[in-house]
């Protein structure tokens, strides 16, 4: 593929076991707002990083009440806490939710902008506070992206996407992911694979650089997901998963995600299904729907997930990708039907209507998805 394109590399990257203990070196002097969630605190994952920050002489204010699918009220509470402590920098420590909140809070604290003026793409143009993001799952890629998703009253998910939200540094420390339960390892890992696949097949802004990263991300993730699930202490597998998720994050920051995410978001908003699992539940159905438009691209990705597909015909490789992903999700112990997360036939119309609100994502899908298509996709996933 040739032609004009633009590409943004994202944050500076620091990787390796124990790297989270050195985040003080990446921050300016002054008070730090540390954004995380209750489970991270309970598991003690942040203890070492917090001790290192305290040893550096900085005052650290911890906000640990970030919930899954974080609300506007939570974001506003974080910003208020940051103002109270006079934060000079922000650390987001955890999964996608704490990192999304930290990104937007750092921007709002530094810029003074009103949240309602920056929704959408490219509307946040000022400068936020210095920001370091530390993922504790290998999945969302949020540490790499310029996007923050917030849940509004009425369960509507709304996003801010702007280069101004990109962190100064992302820290990939595999030691933080060693204790992840198998379901979380599986769901977040598959989420990252969806990022890579959708970036590679995005109808808008796909380019040679995003393709390069998406392919390498998918290769790393596919080779290491099941080892990470089955050997939770496997540092090499955990490290590969974190890097794969990060590369997928950089890829989809440039070539945005599409239909799988558009149909997954309502499951998170309405049923509070974890984001990674929402993606896994819709993935085979949306890929099957897209096959007529994206078969050559799916065929290119197939052997990266299942090396046995190498050398087969295009249709076999594309279909093989779908089957390999379905098989991987099953082996990782993930449910395959929406019924398993409480969705029933009566919910389909509402979910389809919600999915149609995700215009920012739907426009990137290789094949247009109508309201009726969305309905049928949810029905197939039941």
Image (cartoon, rainbow, N blue to C red):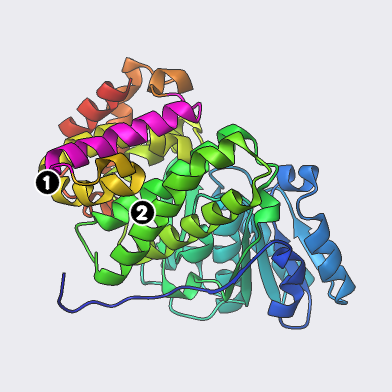
CA neighbours of label 2 inside 10 A, class few (<14), some (14 to 19), many (20+): many
Tell which circle, 2 or 1, labels the residue nearer the N-terminal end: 2
Nearer to us in this view, 199 or 150: 199
**Chief SS of the magenta region:** helix
Identify the secondary structure beneath mark 2.
helix
Q: Is residue 92 above or below residue 287?
A: below
CA neighbours of label 1 inside 10 A, class few (<14), some (14 to 19), many (20+): some
Residue 154 in the image: state x and y as whole percent: 45, 39
Nearer to us in this view, 198 or 27: 198
Q: CA distance from mark 2 to mark 1?
A: 17 Å
Nearer to us in this view, 174 or 156: 174
Q: Is residue 205 above or below residue 324?
A: below
Residue 314 in the image: state x and y as whole percent: 13, 44
User: Start and end of the magenta stretch?
Assistant: 312-335
Residue 248 in the image: state x and y as whole percent: 41, 58
Residue for point 61% across, 58% down: 76
Residue for point 23% across, 54% down: 201
**Which residue is label 2 attached to?**
196
Residue for point 10% across, 41% down: 292
Along the horizontal axis of the image, is 23 left or right of 213?
right
Identify the residue at the far left of this view. Answer: 292
**Residue 117 magenta:** no
**Which residue is label 1 attached to?**
293
**Residue 331 magenta:** yes
Along the horizontal axis of the image, is 145 left or right of 13?
left
In the picture, the disc for residue 218 is none
């Amino acid at each position: 593929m040739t032609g004009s394109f633009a590409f943004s590399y994202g944050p500076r990257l620091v990787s390796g076991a124990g790297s989270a203990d050195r985040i003080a070196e990446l921050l300016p002097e002054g008070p730090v707002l540390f954004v995380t969630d209750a489970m991270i605190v309970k598991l003690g994952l942040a203890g070492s990083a917090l001790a290192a920050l305290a040893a550096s002489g900085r005052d650290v204010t911890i906000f640990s009440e970030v919930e899954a699918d974080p609300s506007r009220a939570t974001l506003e509470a974080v910003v208020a806490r940051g103002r109270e402590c006079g934060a000079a920098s922000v650390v987001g420590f955890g999964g996608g939710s704490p990192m999304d909140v930290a990104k937007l809070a750092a921007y709002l604290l530094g810029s003074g902008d009103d949240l309602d003026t920056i929704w959408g793409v490219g509307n946040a143009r000022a400068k936020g506070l210095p920001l370091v993001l530390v993922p504790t799952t290998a999945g969302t890629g949020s540490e790499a992206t310029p996007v923050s998703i917030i849940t509004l009253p009425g369960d509507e998910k709304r996003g801010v996407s702007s280069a101004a939200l990109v962190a100064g540094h992302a820290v990939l420390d595999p030691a933080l992911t060693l204790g992840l339960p198998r379901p979380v390892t599986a769901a977040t890992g598959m989420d990252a694979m969806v990022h890579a696949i959708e970036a590679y097949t995005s109808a808008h802004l796909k380019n040679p650089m995003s393709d390069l990263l998406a392919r390498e991300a998918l290769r790393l993730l596919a080779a290491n997901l099941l080892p990470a699930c089955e050997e939770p202490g496997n540092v090499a597998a955990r490290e590969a998963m974190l890097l794969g998720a990060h590369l997928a994050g950089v890829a989809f920051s440039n070539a945005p995600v599409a239909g799988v995410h558009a149909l997954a978001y309502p499951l998170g908003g309405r049923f509070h299904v974890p984001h990674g699992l929402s993606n896994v539940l819709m993935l085979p159905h949306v890929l099957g729907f897209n096959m007529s438009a994206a078969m050559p691209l799916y065929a290119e990705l197939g052997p990266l997930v299942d090396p046995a597909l190498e050398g087969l015909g295009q249709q076999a490789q594309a279909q093989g990708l779908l089957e390999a992903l379905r098989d991987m999700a099953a082996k990782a112990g993930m449910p395959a039907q929406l019924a398993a997360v409480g969705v029933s036939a009566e919910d389909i119309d509402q979910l389809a209507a919600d999915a149609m609100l995700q215009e920012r994502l739907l426009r990137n899908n290789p094949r247009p998805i109508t309201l009726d298509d969305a309905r049928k996709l949810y029905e197939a996933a039941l």
